[in-house]
Amino acid sequence: MRQRMWTHILGNPRDDWTVRIVEIDGRACGFAMLWVAKQNPRAVAFYRRNRFELDGAEQIDPGAPMITDARMVR
């Protein structure tokens, strides 16, 4: 399911999303698009230790409507 989701996201760029992809020899080997579950204090603390901060943007994931995603930026 995640492969289908990322194939869709990467194949249909949006102005309000930024996805960074790392390639080695023409193959994707990593990416970054940092949204964290707002209700997950351990994840938020981990990213804060790595110089990310919440910027106030939030969204509800339609696939998991009980989870509020919060954007963190550096």
Image (cartoon, grey):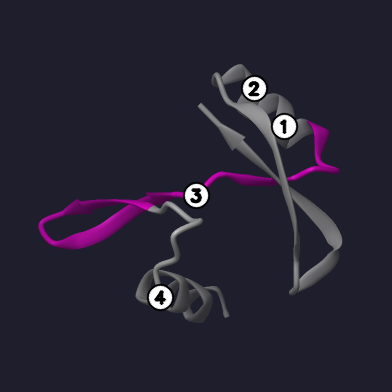
> Mark 1: few, some, or many residues within 10 Å (few <14, many ≥20)?
many
Cα distance in 3D space between marks 2 and 4: 30 Å
Q: Which of 19 and 47 lies nearest the eye of the viewer?
A: 19
Left or right position of 19 against 72: left
Cα distance in 3D space between marks 2 and 3: 16 Å
Which numbered disc, 1 or 3, marks the residue that appears first in the sequence? 3
**Amino acid at the residue labelled 3:** Met
Give above or below for 40 relative to 44.
below
Which label is found at residue 48? 2
Please identify the dominant SS of the magenta region.
strand
Q: Which residue is mark 3?
A: 33
Image spot of residue 47 (x, y percent): 62, 28
The residue at the point 57 percent across, 80 percent down is: 1
Residue range in magenta is 20-41
Which label is found at residue 44? 1
**Amino acid at the residue labelled 2:** Arg
Q: Which residue is mark 4?
A: 12
